[in-house]
Amino acid sequence: MSEEESVPEAESCASQIHVRVDARKMAEKQKDKNEETFDVMDLAEYAKKQRWWNKVFGKKNSGPIAEKYSVATQLAIGGVTGWCAGYLFQKVGKLAASAVGGGFFLLQIANHTGYIKVDWKRVERDVNKAKKQLKLNTEKPPQEVRTKIDEVQTFVKSNIVLTGGFVGGFLLGLAS
């Protein structure tokens, strides 16, 4: 950068400082006259402090998520988190299915070759006992479960766009 180019920049900085000082002096004089005071904001500094996603999508400062972020932001956040959750669910599900299936396969081989003996009457009795316990407990869910269900329903109703993006992303994550 040459000296000729830096001189106008220095002059513009000096004029900006001069304008700011004059604006502050005027504000102090006005303060004496009126009760209302106004802060002088430098828009360049304000724009530098904004995050890039706030510049692109726009963000308000208060209220629920549905009011804070634009529809595009909600769909993007919901879609990305949903896709990640669906992808992980798919990978963990495959791993769990392989482990359970492999374990069952090894038990059948061990039973067939005579390494282990299964008391099938006892297994049937235990399964029937577990069925009866499940039937008794499913008639009325506990208070904690009902409270959590109510919280989830409230969240889904107040953030329908975010939830829709999450569900769509989750299904895409399962498919990929």
Image (cartoon, rainbow, N blue to C red):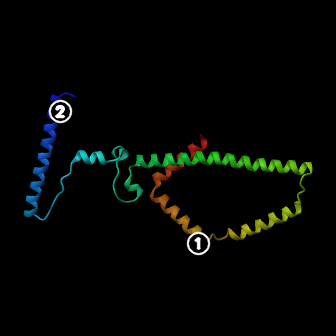
Q: Quadrant of the C terminus?
A: top right
168 or 12: nearer the viewer: 12
Q: Closer to the camera: disc 1 or disc 2?
A: 2
The residue labelled by disc 2 is 6
The percent position of residue 57, horizontal first and vertical second, equals 37, 46
In the displayed structure image, the side of residue 118 where residue 164 appears, left or right: left
The label number, if any, that marks residue 102 in the structure image: none
User: Which amino acid lies under the numbered mark 1 shown in the image of this protein?
Assistant: Gln
On the rendered structure, is 111 left or right of 139?
right
For the residue pair 67 and 93, the one nearer the viewer reads as 93
Quote the CA–CA distance across marks 1 and 2: 71 Å
User: Along the line of sight, which residue is nearer the eye, 61 or 17?
Assistant: 17
**Outermost residue to the front:** 3
Mark positioned earlier in the residue sequence (1 or 2) = 2
Q: Say above or below: 110 vs 127.
A: above
Task: Kindly identify which residue carries mark 1.
Answer: 143
Question: Mark 1, residues whose alpha carbon is within 10 Å: few (<14), some, or many (≥20)?
Answer: few
Is 14 or 160 nearer to us in this picture? 14
